[in-house]
Image: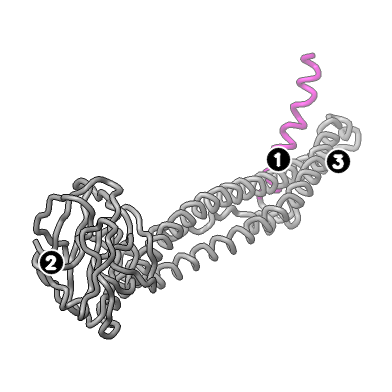
Amino acid sequence: MSRLSSSRSPLAAVVALAAAVLSAGDGNAAPGARDRDRDLVPVSPPAPPPLAVPSTPQSPALALAALDRRIADLDAEEEVSKRELTELGGKIAEAHARSLARGRAFYRLTRAGMLPVGGGFNELVSHALRVERSRRSLAAELTSEKKLRERGVLLSHALERIARDRVALASQRTAMDAARLAVEDEARRQQAFDRAFEMSSGSTEYVAVYGGNGAAPAALPGGFASSKGRLLFPLAGRSEVRPAKREGTDGPGLEIKSALGAPVRAVFGGRVAFADRYGPYGRLVIVDHGDHYYTVSGNLAAMDVKVGDEVSAGERLGTVGDEGRGPMLYFEIRHATQTVAPGSWLGL
């Protein structure tokens, strides 16, 4: 065993000498390996811009457009990364095959041991050079394969990040779209509410019903204005009434306490100009009684009429609701856009 070890020491010295010789001419080690390594330097994907919508004020449409562009950029980045990852699979397989071939060749050369000694010192040096060159080629192939695999890991992480970003952006877009629709819906309600008081039918001959006891209605000679003090009370039975107003109006109005779900009726005949939820009024119905006179019935639990319906005095408009301050009907009378005190109109 000692003889074998001592017999190999000259080869080790020659290999070391060969390594020193090859270090002076690295270009011969692995043809094309340096170019391949230079092409395979892993580069981290560029960091994506922040997901948050810019804090500078902009219209909802512009914000949504910016978010859609960001989502489109993510889609494009994902497509490029997936394509590169697919191509990388083939390159890794080829690099692995080259590494195996280089490894087998290196193994065969190192197994030669002292066999070339019979050819003299020059043959031994040549053999040592071949061994060192094979080792360097194997190292270059292994480095190339490693860099390819590292690039694959980077691409996999990039795809995971893209998936997370897309989920976050999709949630953000859903929230922004819902907010935009809510703003548009509120603007539509505001326009409809304002428009309800801008147009009015002409003088009418609607009939008011008093008492709410099913008795035949009495015919009145004039319209809504001539019925002041004799309008039908909006709720049947006795109720607690107190002056009140809603945010955004000068009032005055009335809060009429009643049982939850009690029927709310029209105080005079007319046409429904508005039936929807609106701000502090909650669900409300506006009835146009002609000559620019309107009644507003708010805080409803349900609405039984729709815009354009013709209603007669005593006809059910909806039911009493509770917006958090107890069941009550909020009632107003308006002439054009001006709110008038309703108490005297109802004979209170």
4 in magenta: yes
Question: What amino acid type is highlighted by mark number 1?
Answer: Leu
Q: Main secondary structure of the magenta part?
A: helix
Q: Residue 53, image x and y in percent?
A: 38, 62
Mark pair 1, 3: CA separation = 14 Å
Please name the residue that numbered disc 2 is placed on: 342
Residue at (54, 53) in percent of width and height: 162
Residue 252 is a magenta residue: no
Q: Report x, y in % for residue 15.
A: 74, 37
Residue situated furthest right in the rendering:
118
Q: Where is residue 298? Give x, y as percent.
A: 25, 60
Give, as a single range, the part of the protein colored magenta.
1-23
Q: Is residue 95 left or right of residue 321?
A: right
Task: Give the residue at x 60% y 51%.
Answer: 155
SS assignment at label 2: loop
Which quadrant of the rendered structure holds the C terminus? bottom left
Between 91 and 224, the one lying in front of the other is 224
Query: 217 left or right of 39?
Result: left
Q: Horizontal and vertical percent for residue 178? A: 41, 60
Which residue has dot 3 on it? 123
